[in-house]
Amino acid sequence: MALKDLFTKNQTKKKKYATIPTEAAKSDVPEGIMTKCPTCKKIMYSKELSKNLMVCLHCGHHFPMNAKERIDSFIDEGSFEEINENMISKNPLNFPDYLEKLEKDRQKSQLNEAVVTGIGSLGGHKLVVAIMDSSFRMGSMGSVVGEKITLAIEKADELGVPFVIFTASGGARMQEGALSLMQMAKTSVALKKFSDNGGLIISIMTHPTTGGVSASFASLGDYNLAEPGALIAFAGRRVIEQSIREELPEDFQTAEFLLKHGQLDAIISRLDMVEKISTILDIHQPGGELA
């Protein structure tokens, strides 16, 4: 496949699933059986939504995915090996109730931190992957998140394999102050070293990717990609409008807006993600089109 054809839209006809279109029907079934799309307002079976990778069967809205769902849908079955899974955050600034909040998030998300890193394969290509999970402290970037991502980049460099990251974050973690902000520089330096050594970096921004994460490692890929409709921003919309005293476009800070203005290479549906990323890896492997 030529590189120019890589991001063309997949015209495969989508499979139709049974849905229940009315609010009245929703009230007749147990909670959790049905899910309502926030974009098109249609109601569908939650199981069918899950089978469709948490993409609305009607309008293509991309619901959030947790790290486990992302690994199951993206990495070759049975190939994922988690690394640095036992790293946990401390409370260096003695921020009130911070440790208690971390513990609640660990119980709720079944994760130790807001990013999962590991070694796996995609389409037979070995890679290192980092997957941020917004269910843990809204995916905020603290010192452990930055350290785990940095160690994952260094592992990819050591193994000589591509580094793929899925970002989902509310930005830097305020409870860790400057230690959180330092992760922007640390991860960026690690990516620069990896790139200088010939490493391939693929960044996939999901909803939302904001603050210090969008301003550092999320935007430093050789390929900067995004899922449809993802919010990608540094400062908040209202802050910008109040600063420049202008009303911003309706689609401002969406993946579509960023693509139109040259800040993304492509927007890829989750349904096409495995195929498209596999093709990129094919192109860059030894003997491939861009190797």
Image: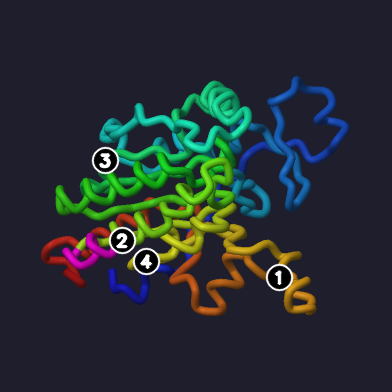
Q: State the CA–CA distance, disc 2 to disc 1.
A: 28 Å
Tell me the SS state at disc 3.
Answer: strand
Cβ–Cβ under 8 Å for marks 1 and 4: no
Cβ–Cβ under 8 Å for marks 2 and 1: no
Front of the two marks 1 and 4 = 1
Residue pictured at 62% horizontal, 31% vertical: 96
| Magenta stretch, residue numbers | 192-198
**Label 1: few (<14), some (14–19) or many (≥20) C-alpha neighbours in 10 Å:** some
Tell me the SS state at disc 1.
Answer: helix
Q: Looking at this rendering, what residue extends furthest in the right direction?
A: 24
Residue pictured at 53% horizontal, 53% vertical: 206
Q: Which one is earlier in the sequence, the residue at label 1 or at label 3?
A: 3
Is residue 219 visible in this depiction of the protein? Answer: yes
Mark carried by residue 240:
1
Q: State the CA–CA distance, disc 3 to disc 2.
A: 24 Å
Residue pictured at 19% horizontal, 53% vertical: 157
Q: Which one is earlier in the sequence, the residue at label 2 or at label 1?
A: 2
Of residues 64 and 212, which is closer to you in this image?
Answer: 212
Indicate whether residue 196 is drawn in magenta: yes
Residue pictured at 38% horizontal, 65% vertical: 220
Q: Which one is earlier in the sequence, the residue at label 3 or at label 2?
A: 3
Front of the two marks 3 and 2 = 2
What residue sits right under mark 2 in the picture?
Answer: 189
User: In the image, is residue 11 above or below residue 148?
Assistant: below
What residue sits right under mark 3 in the picture?
Answer: 120
Cβ–Cβ under 8 Å for marks 2 and 4: no
**Label 2: few (<14), some (14–19) or many (≥20) C-alpha neighbours in 10 Å:** some
Q: State the CA–CA distance, disc 2 to disc 4.
A: 17 Å
Q: Which one is earlier in the sequence, the residue at label 2 or at label 4?
A: 2
What residue sits right under mark 4 in the picture?
Answer: 223
